[in-house]
Amino acid sequence: MSGLWHTLHWREPLNLWFSLLPLAIYVVQRIRNRRDLNQYADAHLHAWVVVAGNQTLWQQFFSRNTAYVMGWLLCVAALAGPRIAVEIPEGTQRNGLDVMVVVDTSRSMHASDVQPNRLRRAQIELHTFLGRAAGNRAGLIVYAAKPHLFAPLTYDYHALSYYLDLIDGLMMPTHGSDAEAALALAQHELHGSAAKGVVLWLTDGDFSGISATQKSALEKRVQEIASTGQHLYILGLGTEEGEPLRDATGKWLEYELQAVVSRMDARYLARLAAMGDGVFSKLSDTDYEWDRLYDRGMMTQTQLALNAEQARHVIWKEYYPWPLLPGLALLLVAVTPYRLTFKRHGATLALVVFLVMILAPYKPGQAASLGDERAAYAAFVRQDFIAAAQLYNDVPGYAGRFGEAVSLYRHGDFSNAVRQFGQAALQAETDVQRQRALFDLGDSYFRLGDYQSATEVFKDVLRYNPRDTNASQNLQYSELLQRLVRERTGEDASLMRQGRGARSARAASGMEIHEHTSISLGDPDQKPTESKPTVIPSNENDTSIQSLVNKGVEHVQLAAEGKVTVQDYHRLQTLSYVKSQLSRIEEARVRVFQRLFEMEEGFPAPLDETQSIPGVVPW
C-alpha cells in the first residue's frame, strides 16, 4: 500500500485543501455553540442546562454527519485527480535515488541449491532489477574476502549490464566473505550524493564462518547506514536447507574435519534489513521479490519529477472513479429524508458501496474487449480455429495475441503462430505470461522442424526459471534432434541455421535481443490450452524420431534452396566471426579486472588460483 501511495500523483493537488472544510465548519460551529451557551447562562450553570447525549459510540459514527464528512472527503480526493504513470517518457528521472548494488561473490555463492547457482541467479535477478530501475543511478560492488568497486554510480545501464555479465567469470584474489567491509565501501560511495542513498545487497546469507565480533561490526555498520539517511535492501539467494560446498578440485570442502554446508540465515538477514531501515526478501520463482524490494520498497523513497513538456507525453491511469462514486453514494445517503439505522440499512449500504467500488474502474472499452474475447473463446471451444484467430485479432494486449497464437497453432499454421507468440511475449504484463508465451514459441519452432531455434528459446525459458522441468525435457529433445539432423546433413551448425534461429526470428518480431533474455510465459487462467511436455525417446532409431529428423532435414533443405540470400549468408558469417572475437575480448577483460583486484589486494604478480587468508574461513 505504501508503494502505491508513493507512486500516486495528483492532477490538481491544491484541491486537497478542500478536505479541511468539514474541520473548519466543525470548529466554527463549536465556537458559535459556545458563544450562544455563554449568552444563555453563566458558566457555572452550564451543567444544569446542557443535556448529555445518550447515543452509543457506534451510533455516533453511523450517522448523517459521518456520511457527510466521508462523502465530502472522497469527492475531494476525486476532484484532486489521483493517477499513476503507466508509461513515462524516455529520459525522465526520479529525484533522489542512488542504488549501490553489493554482490557477494565468495565461494559459497557457487552452491547450486538455487539453480543454476547462487551467483548466476544473482546476475539474472539484477538484470530484472535494472529493467525496473531505469532513470535512477546505480553502481556495482563485488566482494569476497575484500570488496572492490566494479562499476561506479551511473545512469548507463548498458555498461552496468556488461559488467554484470562478467561477474560469474571473475576469480577473486582471496577466499572469504567480509560483508561489513563491502557495506562500508557502499556507504562511502553514496556519501555526499545529493540523491537518496540505497544499498541493495545480494547475498546467500551464510554467516556460519564469522565470529561474534564480526557480527557486531556488521550490525554497527548497518545501523550507521540507516543513521545517515540511507536504506539497506537485501535479497537472499540461498536456501535454509543449504548445500555442501566443493573445493577447486571438485571434492567436498572440509573445515576442521567436517564438510562445509552453506545455509541461508533468513532471520538474521531480515533483522539486518530492519536495522538498515529497509526490506529483506527471499528469492522466488516470480517477481515477488522485486515487487517487495523495489516497487514497495525503494520506490517509496522517491517521486517522479516531471516538467510540463514531459507531463504531456506521460500515459496516465486515472483512479478518480474509485473515490468519486462511493463519495456520491455517501452524500446521497446523508441527504435522504429517512432515519438511518445500522440494523435496517447497514447491509444495504455496505452492498451499495461494494458494487460502486467494483464498477468504478470499469470502462466501456473494457466491456467491448471482453465481449470480443468471449466470442473468440467460444469459437476456440467449438474448434473453429480460423474464426477464433480472427476474433482474437480484435482483442488488444497479451490476451489477444496469445489467443490468436494458440488458435493458429491448433489450426496447424505454425509459421504465423511463431509471430503471434513473439508478440504475446512482448505484450505480456507479467513474467509468468511471458514465460508461457516463450514456451509455446519454442514448441512452434519445434513443429516447424527448426530445432536450432527451439533449442535457443527453451534455453531462454530455463534462464528465467531453471526448475521448469517441461522446458528442460523439451530442450534435451530439441538438442538431440538438432544433433541427429546435423549428422544427417553433415552441415555446420552455423550453416544449418541459415538466419532462422530464435534470435533472428525474435528480432524480426520486434523483440529485444539479449544474451540473458528472461522473457517467460503467461497467466494460466488466460490460456485456452495447456502445453504438454514431450517425452524423450531412449532409442534414437525409433520411427517417431526418424520422422522428426526428416522434418528437420527438410527444413534445412528448404532454407538452402532460397530462403536466405547470399547477402544474408555473408552477414551471418560476419556476425559469427564478430561474436567469436567478442568472446575472446570478454575473456581478456575478465582477466584485466582480476589483475586490478589482485593489485588492490597487494599481490605483485598474477595469481593462478584464489588464495586463502590465515584465520579467515575459505567460503
Image (cartoon, helix red, strand yellow):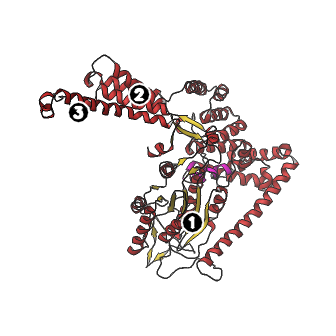
Mark carried by residue 327: 2
Asked whether 511 or 446 is in front, the reply is 511
Q: CA distance from mark 1 to mark 3?
A: 58 Å
Quadrant where the N terminus lies? top left
* Residue at x 73%, y 53% (from the top left corner): 484
The magenta segment is 456-470
Location of residue 36 by image quarter: top left
Residue occupied by mark 3: 57
| Label 2 residue SS | helix
Which residue is found at the position 42% from the left and 70% from the top?
A: 208
Please state the horizontal and vertical placement of residue 169, each as a whole percent of the image: 63, 67
Main secondary-structure element of the magenta-colored stretch:
helix
Mark 3 belongs to which amino acid?
Answer: Leu
Q: Are marks 1 and 3 in contact (CB under 8 Å)?
A: no
Query: Neighbour class for label 3 at 10 Å: few (<14), some, many (≥20)?
Result: few
Mark yes or no: residue 536 visible: no
Mark 1 or mark 3: whose residue is earlier in sequence: 3
Q: Considering depth in this image, is 120 or 366 the residue closer to the camera?
A: 366
Which is nearer the eye, 8 or 392?
8
Q: Secondary structure at mark 1?
A: strand
| Disc with the residue nearer the chain's start (2 vs 1) | 1
User: Dot 2: within a 10 Å radius of its alpha carbon, few (fewer than 14), some, or many (20 or more) residues?
Assistant: many
Q: Amino acid at mark 1?
A: Ile
Tag 2 or tag 3, which sits nearer the N-term?
Answer: 3
- Residue 581 relative to residue 320: left or right: right
Q: Identify residue for label 1.
A: 141
Report how far apart the C-alphas of labels 3 and 2 lie in the structure: 23 Å
